[in-house]
Each structure stands twice: as structure tokens, then as C-alpha cells.
Image (cartoon, helix red, strand yellow):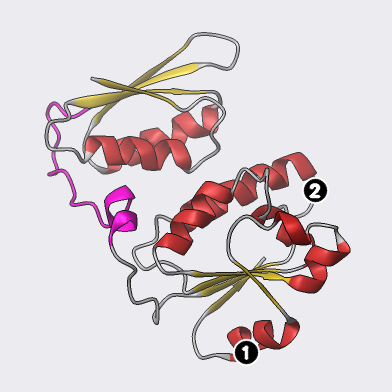
Amino acid sequence: MTQLDMMGNPCPIPVIRAKKELEKPDSDGVLVLVDNIVAVQNLEKMAKGLGYTFSYASDGDARFRVSIGKDGASMPVPTPISGDTALAAPAQDQTDGVTVLITKDMMGDGSEELGRILIKGFIFSLTELPVLPKAVIFLNSGVRLAVEGSNTLADLQKLSDAGATILACGTCLNYYGLTEKLAVGEVTDMFGITGHLAAPGKLITL
């Protein structure tokens, strides 16, 4: 049984990583280490939805050991629809993908710490969509997510490598003194941003 150390990773990362491991033809199950009960509950929902066995134990100090087994599974292992293999492939046609506009470096209102955890999980989730976004655009403090030191860079680079357009507002980068620190994507102006937002297709705004 493969062990995955997902301590410190917000949902849905533990669920997606565990599901990928279970999708491997030679996998007999997975042991996942997580640090919050919400991740345990989401792993349980995923496991039971696929007909796998599930159990967990707490090691104390917010440390949980989740065991998901494929013995007696009532459903076949699903065929992966995305993931590392798909992202390593040549750039795909993104004409059906959504445009995502991110206007701040956190998600939602309230706790800033929680908001930053949520935005990291959201950007990671974008890399797992069956059809990846055609563009991810950063405005205002959202540009901080695309500069050096950001914990979202790896996922944004995956999106870029897969063909998604990553754009950061030049005025915003300049305002925050980050113009020289953009690490993924391209600098654009408001006219370019307006053109993307006005194009046909779906739009997600955060």
C-alpha cells in the first residue's frame, strides 16, 4: 500500500492525489497522512463513492492516518481524465475553457490566512479540470500569486505549459513593486485584459 504524506496540503489536494494513486493498475490501496478532519471526511466521501474500503485513526496532534483499500471494490477503477500525464502532453485546444479573473491574493472574505489556503487550493483545482482554463488573469493584489516566492507558481506553470494564457496586470505589478519579479505568464495592460473578458465564453471572477 502506497503512503502519501499530505500534511499541510489543503483540500482538494489530498483527495486528488489519493485518487490518482488509486487509479494506477497495480495499486491495492493508499495510506494518506493528513492534518485536518475535513480532509479525512473528503477522502471518505471519495472512497465510498468509488466503492473502496475506508478507515482512519488519529495519531494525535492533528495527525490522521487514512487507509483506503481496493479489496472488494464494487466499482472499477475509473480512467484518469487529467493529471500529470495530461499536463505533460502537447498544449491542448483551450477554446472551450473558461477565463478566470483573480483580483486578490486570497479567496473570500474573513480570515486572510484561510483565504490564502483557499486560493492555493483553487488554483491547484484548475489544473485538474477536464478542460483547462483558456486564460487566468491577475489584477490588483492577485498579481502576487504569479511572482517569485508564491506557493502557487508550480500550478500556474502547469497551466501555462498545457496551453493556458497567464496574464498579470502591468499597472498592478508596478504599484506593488513587483514588475521585475513576475515568475510565470506575461505582463498585459487593461486593454488586453478587457479583450479577454469581452471574448465569448464563460468567466469566473474571484
- 8 or 142, which is in the foreground? 142
Q: Residue at x 85, y 58 (%)?
A: 177
Q: Residue 5: where, in percent of width, then height? A: 43, 23
Q: Please name the residue that numbered disc 2 is placed on.
A: 110
Q: How many marks?
A: 2
Q: Quadrant of the N terminus?
A: top left
Task: Tell which residue pokes out farthest to the front in this image.
Answer: 180
Residue at the image point whose x is 39% and y is 61% from the top: 129
Does the magenta portion include 72?
Answer: yes
**At numbered mark 1, what does the secondary structure look like: helix, strand or loop?**
helix
Please provide the residue range marked out in magenta: 69-89
Furthest toward the top, the residue is: 59
Quarter of image, res 168: bottom right
| Relative image position of residue 32 (x, y in whole percent) | 38, 24
Location of residue 20 (image quadrant): top left
Q: Amino acid at mark 2?
A: Gly
Q: Position of residue 174 (x, y in %)?
A: 83, 65
The residue under the point 12% across, 44% down is: 76
Q: Is residue 31 above or below residue 88?
A: above
User: Of 8 and 85, which appears nearest the observer?
Assistant: 85
From this viewpoint, is residue 68 visible? no
Residue that label 1 marks: 195
Residue 109 located left or right of residue 185: right
Q: How dense is the environment of label 2, judged by Cα within 10 Å: few (below 14), some, or many (20 and up)?
A: few
Q: Is residue 171 left or right of residue 120?
A: right
Magenta stretch: dominant secondary structure: loop
